Each structure stands twice: as C-alpha cells, then as structure tokens.
Image (spheres, rainbow, N blue to C red):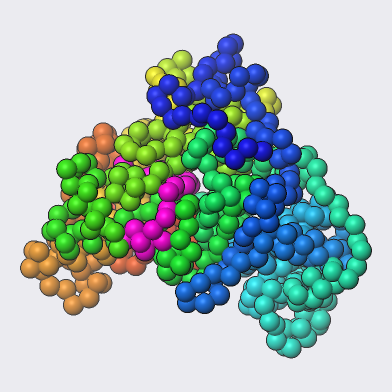
C-alpha cells in the first residue's frame, strides 16, 4: 500500500455525488467505478494483513510502547509484537481453545501491551474477540460472557476475575481465565474450587513458544469482533464485525485523508477503550502504516503527562475531553489577558498562541491532527485547536454498526457545521420521517448507510438486527440529517430518544442538551420530559472552572462548592445563559427547559452514568434524579396554578 494516496483535497468541490436512480443516495467523489470501494489498498483485507503491512513499511520499527519510567517510554518492535501474538494464540490452543469461528474469547482489561498481544493472538487462530468494557461493571460483563458463551477470559485485575467466578453459575461456558498481572494463591484456589482453570499471561506465551501449533489466519468474511455497544438504555447489543468490515472502513478512511493520513513517522496515544470501535479503528490505522502506538499509564487524570512524555503526532479524543482541555487553556488565557479565549479574533491569534505555548507543550508539542468522534464538537472548541494549537481536526460521524466512520470532515481552519461526505466504502441516503416533519424530497431524513463496512447483525438477537438493518441492507442510524448544497451531510436531529409532550409535539432531548452544553457554565446536562407534561426540566452539573471566578467577580461568598451550587443567583446565572443559548440556536418555546436543578458532582462512566464515549445513560440519570425531577415538575405546576 502507498503511504500517501495522491491528491485528495478537502475543498468545497471535494464532496459527495448523487447516484443515479437511487432515490437520492450519495457516494464519495473518490469512487469512480461502482458505488463503493471495498478495500483501498492491495493486501489489506484482514487485520492480520494490517500488522504485516506495518512490519514492512516501518522496516520493523517501533510498534507498541508503555510508560517505563517518569520520563520515558519503552517499545517493542513489529516483529517482536507479531511473535508474541503468535505464541499467545498457540498457547491458547494448547490450553484448550478450539481454533476457528466457533470460539469466542473475552478481554476484560485496560489498554496495555498484553491487551493487543492477546487480541492478535486470538485472531492468529481465527477465533472471535469479545472486548468486555472495563468501565461497564460486572453485570454488563456477565451478560456478555453469557450471551457469547465465552470459554476464555483474559483479565488484568483480581477483583474482575473474582466477580466472574463468584457468578460462575450465570456463565457456565467459562472454563479458563488468563491473568495479565500477578495473582494471589487465594485466587488460584478460588478458581479451582469453582471449576475454572487459571493461567498467567506469561505462562500461556511460554507454552505457545514451545509448541508447533499451526496458525489459522483469518479470512475476510470471518467475524473479528463482537463489539458491544455501550447503549444508553437496556442491555448492550453485540455488534458482529468481520475483518472485511474493519479493513474496508480503515483503508478507505485512510485513502480519503490524503496527505493528512498517518504514516510510519507518526505516533498516537492509546487510551480510548479498546472495547469501543473508535479505539479499534485508530489502532488499525497506525498498525497498517507502520506507525507507533503508546499506551497511557492507566490513570486518565495523568493522560496529559503521558502525552508530554510520548509526544504523539495524532490525538484521538471525544469532544467532552477536548472541552475540558479547552477550559484549561481558557483559564490560562484569562489569567494572562483577563479576557475570554476566542479564536475568532484573528488579530490576537499570534499572542494567544504564545500564551498557550505551555498548554500545547503539555500535549507533547507535536500533535498535528486530532480525531474527534462519538459526539459533535463545538465551533469555539474546534477553532481553538485549528487556529491556536495549530493542528487539523478530523470530525468523524458514524457508529459501531458501520465499523466506526461513515463520513468525516477534515478541518484546518473554520468550523463548517457539517460532518463531511461519505467515506468511499459507504453509500448514504436520507429516509423521510414524516412524523417529525422530515421528507427525503427536501433532502432531509434519517441517515441510512450501506456498503462493505456494515455489520453482519447483533449476536443472537435477530429482532434487533431487523430493526437496524432493513431487507435491502440499509443500516438505519436513528440520526436525522440533511444534504447541504455542496453535497456534505449535516446532522440536525435525532430520531431515537425523542419524546412527545402533552402538547402533541416531539422534542429531542439530546439535540437540546448539545445546545445548552455550549454554555461555559455547564459541565454536564440532562434534559428530561414526560408525555403527560407540557414542559421540559433539566439536571445541570455546573462547570467548576468558570463558576468560582464569576462568584469572586460578583463578591459572592461560598464556604464550599456545594454551597455555591445551592446559591439561587448561580442557578439564575446558568438558567439565563441556557435560555440565551437556546434562543440563539433557534429552539422553540416548548424546547426550552422551564427549570433546572444544580448537582455539584460530575457524574462518570465509572459510576454508571455515562457510556465509555461519554454519552448519558438516560435511564440511569432519570432514576437517580427522580426526586429532584419530581420537585422541579411540582414547582412549575404550583406556580402555574
């Protein structure tokens, strides 16, 4: 494969084209024959091909790295990594794994070298990998192990293993556990008493090195991953993705990136959960070209310190993290200039870059491109990174069911407000949603995707598969989009999670939350509505970076953050700013919340409130704040009487 596909530019002209006689479906302009490109490069059809390409292109360069000291990373080369993966796969077969597509193997751990050695070891025997979210907790993991009938789980912590063994009766398929780290004698005995064989990671590698079990390398049609969606409601769904799915999305995205695509000279930090498709696709992109991947130290609060040492050239992130980093930069600017950080003021860009130099260096000082996915990025945040930090931002739109990306826009300056054009392996059409007032004849409707990157269905769930994939092979995303005149796609609404108020009108809480979240005074927000009520209310977590300075400027005293969050003037400040944001964004009167409750503590995915991509788990928020929501509703009704 070539390192730089020729001449792909990102101008107004380089957008999608309508496919004749397709009811408005559009494809990438880069597709000159047919509707899609299956693989953009030769010999890049499976994930095993990807790492072999990386070995050749890098000339056996640095592959995976980890923090080995306070000031440095240690690395293994591509050939060392491949050998360890082959040994591990052969060791799994020796301890009892059946090679091939009948075997499902779970990995229940944080990102680390052992994670990827296990992953590629599993694939070296054509078995199916089932990542278990490290952040979803024991109940979700038990559900996944049970549904996939997993026989082998590879884990990094004793507590996770104890949770699995404690519930052995719920996961009768579980036979082997492989521990990445040291384990106690008590754990070994506990596993034995419950009929589970436990092995150390190094033991499995050593066994594999000493046997001559043949490799059983995967075919393009083989299932590579059962990637469980993080789901905002109910049990997760196991998305079955083939090697073709993954590599089709990976190679065509890389091709479309042109000269901005990663090369063997680039490096990236790995911290996004490998159980999420975003993390998987970033890793594939770098392995395919011979790039270097450095793991974070395991503590997300030390991510910036890891980046300072690693000095990556690419930074994958969800908007929530980019917002948090932006807030830190804004605090730095405010302390120096006593003004708000604003990339719109071109006359100050040079001065702002100088002031933000410590911030830029804290990210390693070499970031040239940011991958942003899982949610929309805000205009002011995006333009800060493009104009002040000086890197490109690739905003990706897609979902697990289409192997990650579906469209993307690559920006190096101004915010465009759209998610770009389809990648070459995808065709996109907009299906009308009359009940919400969206009609395909007006170039508006539900975003539907088709192509070689589309998943094969949900594991053991034909009902939900049929709901997502129609009889013609179109994946229905639940997002509402519109085609812009230049052929770019803009996401304007959400079909899922809409609710009907007693007025008979539909509202989309997620869309409203995205608008209100632009307020500098808001860290998190949950908008709630009820079909028996005519109005919306919200739970708001105030932003700790901006509220205290406002209180100080207004001579307000608060003994604690909790006291500040209970202050009526703070509530009024946030509520009025939200209302202003809503009006500016064109929210209708019934879409504006009528009252808010302030909660002092940021709610995390560790606590079960967010998915690993920082989306709200709406049922959890609703249940947790039931009393506060009821009090807001009662207060509004009392004042209305």
Q: Going 16% across and 62% down the picture, which residue do you hit? A: 336
Question: Residue 570: where, in percent of width, then height?
Answer: 18, 61
Q: In this view, does 542 lie above or below 351?
A: below
602 left or right, relative to 350: right
Q: Is residue 536 above or below residue 35?
A: below
Q: Can residue 536 be seen in this view?
A: no
Q: Nearer the viewer, residue 266 or 436?
A: 266
Question: Residue 365: where, in percent of width, then height?
Answer: 39, 58
Q: Is residue 11 above or below residue 382?
A: above
Q: Is residue 99 above or below residue 94?
A: above
Q: Going 85% across and 63% down the picture, which residue do you hit? A: 90
Q: Which residue lies furthest to the bottom in this view?
A: 185
Q: Going 38% across and 54% down the picture, which residue do you hit? A: 322
**Is 413 included in the stretch rendered in magenta?**
no
404 left or right, relative to 626: right
Q: Going 50% across and 37% down the picture, which residue do you hit? A: 259
């Amino acid at each position: 494969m070539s390192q730089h596909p020729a001449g792909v530019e990102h101008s107004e002209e380089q957008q999608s084209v309508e496919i004749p006689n397709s009811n408005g479906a559009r494809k990438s302009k880069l597709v000159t024959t047919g509707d899609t490109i299956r693989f953009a490069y030769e010999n890049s059809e499976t994930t095993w091909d990807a790492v072999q390409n990386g070995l050749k292109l890098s000339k056996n360069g640095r592959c995976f790295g980890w923090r080995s000291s306070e000031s440095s990373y240690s690395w293994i080369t591509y050939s060392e990594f491949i050998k360890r993966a082959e040994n591990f796969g052969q060791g799994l077969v020796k301890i009892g794994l059946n090679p091939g597509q009948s075997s499902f193997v779970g990995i229940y751990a944080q990102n680390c070298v052992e994670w990827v050695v296990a992953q590629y070891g599993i694939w070296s025997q054509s078995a199916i990998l089932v990542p278990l979210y490290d952040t979803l907790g024991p109940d979700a993991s038990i559900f996944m192990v049970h549904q996939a009938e997993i026989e082998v789980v590879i884990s990094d912590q004793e507590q996770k293993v104890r949770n699995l063994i404690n519930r052995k009766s719920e996961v009768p398929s579980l036979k082997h556990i492989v521990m990445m780290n040291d384990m106690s004698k008590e754990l070994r005995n506990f596993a034995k008493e419950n009929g589970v064989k436990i092995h150390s990671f190094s033991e499995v590698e050593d066994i594999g090195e000493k046997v001559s079990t043949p490799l059983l390398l995967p075919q393009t049609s083989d299932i590579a991953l059962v990637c469980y969606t993080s789901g905002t409601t109910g049990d997760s769904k196991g998305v079955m993705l083939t090697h073709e799915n993954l590599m089709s999305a990976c190679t065509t995205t890389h091709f479309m990136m042109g000269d901005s695509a990663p090369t063997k000279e680039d490096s990236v930090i790995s911290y996004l959960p490998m159980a999420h498709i975003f993390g998987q696709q970033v890793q594939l992109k770098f392995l395919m070209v011979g790039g270097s991947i450095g793991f974070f130290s395991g503590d997300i609060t030390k991510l910036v310190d890891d980046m300072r040492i690693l000095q990556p050239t690419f930074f994958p992130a969800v908007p929530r993290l980019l917002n948090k980093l932006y807030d830190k930069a804004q605090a730095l600017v405010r302390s120096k200039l006593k003004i708000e950080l604003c990339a719109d003021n071109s006359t100050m860009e040079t001065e702002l870059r100088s002031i933000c130099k410590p911030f830029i260096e804290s990210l390693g000082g070499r970031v040239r491109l940011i991958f942003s996915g899982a949610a929309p990025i805000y205009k002011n945040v995006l333009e800060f990174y493009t104009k002040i930090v000086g890197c490109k931002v690739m905003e990706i739109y897609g979902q697990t069911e289409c192997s990650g990306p579906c469209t993307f826009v690559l920006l190096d300056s101004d915010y465009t407000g759209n998610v770009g054009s389809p990648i070459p392996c995808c065709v996109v059409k907009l299906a009308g949603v009359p009940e919400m007032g969206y009609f395909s004849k007006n170039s508006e409707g539900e975003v539907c995707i088709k192509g070689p990157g589309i998943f094969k269905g949900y594991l053991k769930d034909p009902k939900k598969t049929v709901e997502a994939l129609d009889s013609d092979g179109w994946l229905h995303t639940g997002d509402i989009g519109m085609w812009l005149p230049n052929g770019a796609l803009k996401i304007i609404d959400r079909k899922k999670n809409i609710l009907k108020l007693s007025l008979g009108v539909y509202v989309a809480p997620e869309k409203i939350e995205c608008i209100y979240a632009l307020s500098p005074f808001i860290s998190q927000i949950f908008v709630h509505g009820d079909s028996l009520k005519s109005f919306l209310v919200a739970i708001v977590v105030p932003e700790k970076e901006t509220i205290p300075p406002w209180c100080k400027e207004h001579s307000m005293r608060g003994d604690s953050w909790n006291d500040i969050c209970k202050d009526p003037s703070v509530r009024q400040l946030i509520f009025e700013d939200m209302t202003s944001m809503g009006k500016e964004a064109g929210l209708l009167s019934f879409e504006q919340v009528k009252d808010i409750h302030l909660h002092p503590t940021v709610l995390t995915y560790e606590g079960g409130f967010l998915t690993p991509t920082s989306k709200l788990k709406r049922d959890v928020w609703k249940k947790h704040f039931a009393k506060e929501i009821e009090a807001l509703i009662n207060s509004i009704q009392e004042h209305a009487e």
